[in-house]
Image: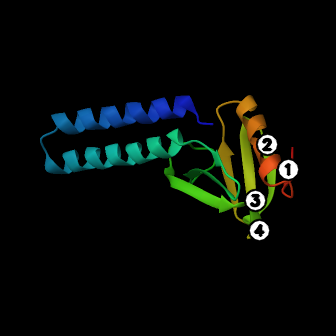
Amino acid sequence: MRSLPLCAAWLILVGVNLELGSVRTQPLEIIFFLFLAIYATQAFVAEALGVRVGNESISFSRRLVSGFPFLVFWRVNIKWAEIDQMISRPNARVRVQKNTGERLQVSFGNREARLRFFQFVRQAAPSISISR
């Protein structure tokens, strides 16, 4: 379950930054665009891996700001025992609330992907409260 439009956007950003870095002559500009290309590459990989649901944990892209998809710092892995509840949100999103009070947001490409996610959650961890 991954967002293909976000994956495409990250690949475009990688290409644009590499191209801009290759035509610049100032070392600081080259380093800046290379840094942005590396950042976009890690965000692409994090997004391309999608949402992973396992028997013991869930893994997804870590976004620093829930409504802004371009501040991605790798991935977060949460064990089922650490999750208190999951809340369905508009625009194919799910809020995961941990026992510690921390709230994380998972974004899906569409509503059907979110529904399949909830089916997996019910199979893997039936004790988690799912609300809409």
Color scheme of the displayed model: rainbow
Residue extending farthest to the front is: 55
Query: Label 2 to label 1, Cα distance in Å?
Result: 8 Å
Who's the residue at 77% across and 51% down the image? Answer: 124
Marker disc for residue 113? none
Q: Toward which corner of the image does residue 117 lie, by quadrant?
A: top right
Amino acid type at mark 3: Gln
Residue extending farthest to the left is: 25
Q: Earlier in the sequence, mark 4 or mark 2?
A: 4
Amino acid type at mark 2: Phe
The residue carrying mark 2 is 118
Looking at the picture, how far across and down is residue 9, in whole percent? 46, 32
Query: Label 3 to label 2, Cα distance in Å?
Result: 15 Å
Query: Label 3 to label 4, Cα distance in Å?
Result: 7 Å
Say whether marks 4 and 1 touch (CB < 8 Å): no
Looking at the picture, how far across and down is residue 116, in whole percent? 75, 36
- Callout 2: helix, strand or loop? helix
- Callout 4: helix, strand or loop? loop
Amino acid type at mark 1: Ile
Quadrant including the C terminus: top right
Amino acid type at mark 4: Asn
The residue carrying mark 4 is 99
- Callout 1: helix, strand or loop? strand
The residue carrying mark 3 is 97
